[in-house]
Amino acid sequence: MVRRDELLAYLHGLLETARFRDYAPNGLQVEGTATITKLVSGVTASRALVEAAVAAGADALLVHHGYFWQGEDPCVVGIKKARLAPLLAHDINLFAYHLPLDAHEIYGNNAQLAVQLDLIVTGRFGPEPALAMCGELSVPLSLAAFARRIEHALARPPLCVNGGEHLIRRVGWCTGAAQKYLEAAAALGLDAYISGEISEHTVHAARELGIHFFAAGHHATERYGVAALGQHVAQRYAIEHLHIDLDNPA
Ligand SMILES: [Zn+2]
């Protein structure tokens, strides 16, 4: 088992949470039992994930998308009450890490997506602290072949925007809702850029910038960081860990 405070301090240091100005608090968002023997991880602390954690007998839940986002109604009513009530009733700690978990060198969403897609990481880009990564394919691929690789790795076909006739060798990526870095990727001369989500205007931008764009799913691109982090802390403290992946088409 591990003490809650020890785990919190370890995660704070490992993920360098103090480096990030974020849209939600990073760290312990809901306090539960003082000692932890079973950890459940998942992408988003939805009601379904909370209920699955309760059913699994977890005393801590580790997520990428927690609660208390900037600009949301802070009152504990409606769906927010329904999510918090089972956590409090079962004394389950909720640990949430947003940008620090996108960014981490090993357990981060972007680092773990590189593993899934067999990308050789060569650097980072975007505003500091830089979240997006760039890298290379060992063998250049066509748009269709790279789309198949993404589909195979993430078990979900990506939405592809053809940015020209060129093959893909140098790639940029940033998981989740990070299509805003497309122009920065094009400015670096990358052949393709991958993120989770896509808007209508991004299709035109990719075509006009001459860079292929893949929207591979917000959830699908962000499952791997939190699972890897959960596995790591479980190993470090010899506690049980269960990653629960609840399907999300977005
Ligand atoms: Zn996200």
Image (cartoon, rainbow, N blue to C red):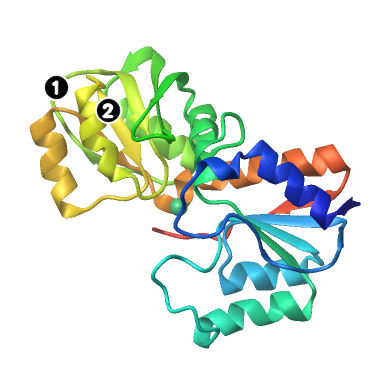
Give the quarter of the image for residue 193.
top left
In this view, which residue lies farthest toward the top? 139
Residue 65: % across, % down: 53, 58
Between tags 1 and 2, which lies in front?
2
Foreground: 163 or 185? 185
Residue 218: % across, % down: 41, 51
In this view, which residue lies farthest toward the right? 1
Q: Which residue is mark 2?
A: 192
Left or right: where 199 falls relative to 250: left
In the rendered image of this protein, does residue 95 appear above or below residue 151? below
Foreground: 14 or 246? 14
Q: Quadrant of the C terminus?
A: bottom left
- Residue under the point 78% across and 65% down: 56
- Residue under the point 59% across and 83% down: 82
Left or right: where 96 falls relative to 134: right
Q: Which residue is mark 1?
A: 165
